[in-house]
Image (cartoon, rainbow, N blue to C red):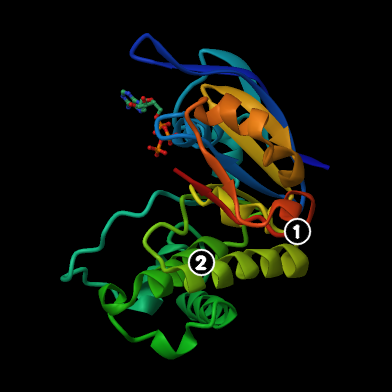
Amino acid sequence: MKILEVNDLSVRINERTIIENITFSVEKGEIIAIVGPNGGGKTTLIKSILGFIQPYKGYIKLLGKPPGEAVKTGKIGYLPQKSSVPKDFPFSVLDVVMLGLINKKIPKEKKLKKAREYLKYVGMERFENKPYSSLSGGQQQRVSIARVLVSDPEIIFLDEPSTGIDVVAQESFYDFLQRLKKEKNMTIVMVSHDIGVVGRFVDKVAGLNRFLHFYGHPKEFFKKEVLENIYGAEVELIIHSPECVACEHFHIDFK
Ligand SMILES: Nc1ncnc2c1ncn2[C@@H]1O[C@H](COP(=O)(O)OP(=O)(O)OP(=O)(O)O)[C@@H](O)[C@H]1O
């Protein structure tokens, strides 16, 4: 079942075309990573899918509806790009998760129960009374994910969810996303810079640099000509283990 359909989408901001002729679709339960160079239009694409930016050309269907209507169903989760949290941010961990239910008309006790259930799901239940600002980057991110999940979305959009967390936390974060897919058949669309890591965890990669240069399985993505198309010819590709191009493990650095 198609949960997201983007058809011949072009977006202009201030008379400048930011993304052009983008076509792809996402099935229920898939994990998609949108990758590409800085300024390639990844965030613009996500914001267009969520209806924050209007298309110049083409159309988007999210849960079979135009974005504005889909977002109103409450079935869409969105974690924007991380901004740093001030030390005096006044919310506890539990408060932050409760924010995810702010628009739901259900009794407070039920909200609390749900918020605690999701804190447990992300392994943060022991921290519920701690100030959110006192947590590490990885812990804050788990709590933010709980806030997104607590409203039972059908699809979630994560904009650079692993920024600011260490490599070990990143790995366990991507494992967590796979658990979410397996256990809840969650559809996940994320923007990522860690192309070497996401290859191991996602079903499809969308390589975006104004145009959608690539959309398909990670194994096909990690080829010199595909990467040069997206990142430019100056990219130097170091594959630590050449045989890994054909296996599950990609170890790739960009210089
Ligand atoms: N509100 C805006 N006003 C003017 N220009 C914008 C606006 N939003 C995005 N842009 C421009 O559109 C281009 C794409 O930006 P976008 O943030 O979508 O890229 P990105 O791939 O997410 O980049 P990054 O990896 O750096 O986050 C950039 O050149 C940016 O300057």
Q: Are marks 1 and 2 in contact (CB under 8 Å)?
A: no
* 28 displayed left or right of 12: right
- Upstream in the sequence, badge 1 or badge 2? 2
- Quadrant of the snapshot with the C terminus: top left
Point out the residue furthest to the left here. Answer: 88
Q: Which numbered marker is on residue 150? A: none
- Quadrant of the snapshot with the N terminus: top right
Q: Amino acid at mark 2?
A: Gln
Q: Amino acid at mark 1?
A: Glu
* 87 displayed left or right of 119: left
Q: Is residue 145 visible?
A: yes
Near mark 2 (Cα within 10 A), the count class, few <14, some 14-19 or many ≥20, is some
Q: Is residue 221 above or below residue 127?
A: above
Q: Is residue 64 visible?
A: no
Say which of 253 and 88 sits in front: 253
Q: Residue 113: x and y, percent?
A: 54, 81
Point 66% across, 30% down: residue: 226
Point 48% across, 22% down: residue: 54
Say which of 173 and 52 sits in front: 173
Judged by depth in the image, the label closer to the viewer, 1 or 2, is: 1
Q: Residue 81: x and y, percent?
A: 39, 49
Q: Would you name the residue on which mark 2 appears?
A: 170
CA gap, disc 1 to disc 2?
17 Å
Secondary structure of residue under mark 1:
loop
Q: Is residue 95 above or below residue 207?
A: below
Q: Quadrant of ligand 1?
A: top left
Q: Would you name the residue on which mark 1 appears?
A: 248
Point 36% across, 74% down: residue: 95
Q: Residue 28: x and y, percent?
A: 77, 49
Q: Quadrant of residue 135?
A: bottom left
Near mark 1 (Cα within 10 A), the count class, few <14, some 14-19 or many ≥20, is few
Say which of 80 and 76 sits in front: 80
